[in-house]
Amino acid sequence: MKHSKRELTIALAGVFQAAKLVKQIANTGLANNAIIESSIETLFKQDAKTVEDVYGGLSGISSGIKTLEKQFASNKERDLDITKYVISLLILERKFSANQMAQDDLYKKLDDIKMSLEYFSLMHENVFTKLGDLYKNTISPLGPKIIVTSDRPYLTNQQNADKVRSLLLAGIRSAVLWRQCGGSRWQFIFSRKSYLKECENVQSEC
């Protein structure tokens, strides 16, 4: 099934949204909880009817759309850390999608974590701990590992480290969705103008 440029843009924005949140937590220890929740929720929406529904509507991906637009619009405003994380997530997604054992293990464990949401809220530290362990044990070994940089000690805090790993997992989920919509490395490099146009269209609806 052929997907639209709008769907491609929304899915790629999900990767950028996760990457930006990772940088914010690594450098400040803080990020907007509503945006974190929108990204984490995507991990439990494997059967959503539309790409937009994966993010709970456009409001759930608006931060990612703005980040994608800023990253693609100008070299001067581009954040190299975010670019690095996005590219690393796209590379890891390819390794994950080529490894059926890793896929089976991850989706089974995500189902187990989803069941625990009957007892814990999505933003509970226990959920982040489980998602962080899932990333560390299932995605990270596929390599290359994503090195999250920071000149501050925020990642020495276990809760922040768990949030970062959970968001990297959410980034992988969006990367998988982007690939399913027809995204590719060459398109990422050479179709930036069309992505920017769709960013403008989507933002006019937000």
Image (cartoon, helix red, strand yellow):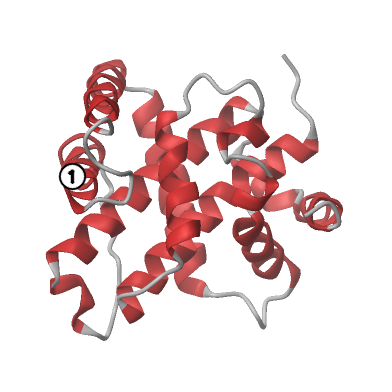
Q: Secondary structure at mark 1?
A: helix
- Residue 12 in the image, given as x and y percentages of width and height: 61, 46
- Residue 50 in the image, given as x and y percentages of width and height: 66, 26
Residue 30 lies in quadrant: bottom left
Residue at the image position 28 percent from the left and 22 percent from the top: 111
Task: For the C terminus, give its image quadrant.
Answer: bottom right
Residue at the image position 54 percent from the left and 56 percent from the top: 16
Task: For the N terminus, give its image quadrant.
Answer: top right
Report the amino acid beneath label 1. Lys
Residue 84 shows up from this direction: no
Where is mark 1, residue-wise?
A: 136
Residue at the image position 36 percent from the left and 52 percent from the top: 167
Q: Is residue 92 above or below residue 146?
A: above
In this view of the protein, which residue sits in the foreground, 41 or 73? 41
- Residue 61 in the image, given as x and y percentages of width and height: 62, 51
Q: Is residue 129 above or below residue 174?
A: below
Q: Is residue 134 above or below residue 148?
A: above
Drawn side of residue 193 relative to residue 30, left or right: right
Drawn side of residue 78 relative to residue 172, left or right: right
Residue 97 shows up from this direction: yes
Residue 36 lies in quadrant: bottom left
Residue at the image position 86 percent from the left and 57 percent from the top: 204
- Residue 107 in the image, given as x and y percentages of width and height: 31, 22
How many labels sit on residues?
1
In this view of the protein, which residue sits in the foreground, 134 or 45? 45
Drawn side of residue 165 relative to residue 186, left or right: left
